[in-house]
Amino acid sequence: GDTVEKTRQLLETLRAIHAHDDEAAAKAADESRAREQALERAAAAEERLEVEIGAHYTTKAELDHVYAELEEAPELKEALEEKEKACQGLRDEVAERRARAAATRRELEALAACRAQANAALHAALEAQDEYRSEHQRARIALDEARQEIIRQKELVNEQRSALEARDMEL
């Protein structure tokens, strides 16, 4: 009774672990794909921004040259300031995207660690299940051997009883 109940409980626990691991693996795969896609988009955007920043630096250098030649032109000075603000905005955006990409990488690493822990727990549970099965099999074999010994002992007792009864009849 207890062994059957323990077996049933162990099987229910293992099923729950399997279901949880399958769910965690599916969720991890989905999140991993989504994060990888986000990282790819961020990397592509970062590359585009770096090209634009390079173009803006070139433009800024050209504007600096013109600015040096025409300091008295207020419109040119205003345009230069706007370009500088735009370049700073782009640099800030690149820095923000790099920070987000780093945060996403950390999340992916944490997710991978969580999955590794879940896999280790599942592996331990499967080993425990195998050990339980082996123990159960050994117990069944011992029980069968004990039953056979009881049957043999009963037969021996019956034979001795019959021999005693036959002897008593002769007397």
Image: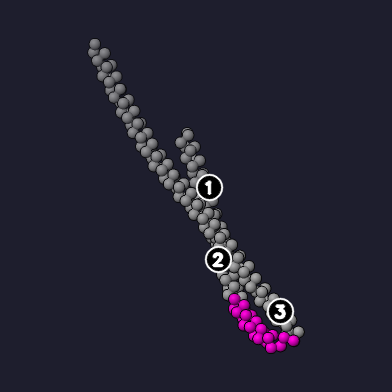
Residue 65 drawn in magenta = yes
- Could you tell which of marks 2 and 1 lies nearer the N-terminus? 1
Q: Which residues are magenta?
A: 50-73
Report the colour scheme: one colour
Q: Are marks 3 and 1 in contact (CB under 8 Å)?
A: no
Residue drawn 41% across the image and 43% down it: 131
Return the residue at label 1: 16
Does the rendering let one see residue 135?
yes
Residue drawn 64% across the image and 80% down it: 56
Q: Is residue 2 left or right of residue 37?
A: left
Residue 169 image-quadrant placement: top left
Few, some or many C-alpha atoms within 10 Å of disc 3 (few <14, some 14-19, many ≥20)?
some
- Could you tell which of marks 3 and 1 lies nearer the N-terminus? 1
Residue found farthest to the top: 171
For the residue marked with disc 1, what is the amino acid? Ala
Q: Main secondary structure of the magenta part?
A: helix
Q: What is the spatial separation of the Cα atoms under label 3 and label 2, in whole angstroms?
A: 38 Å
For the C terminus, give its image quadrant.
top left
Q: What is the spatial separation of the Cα atoms under label 3 and label 1, in whole angstroms?
A: 63 Å
Q: Which mark is residue 81?
A: 3
Return the residue at label 2: 36
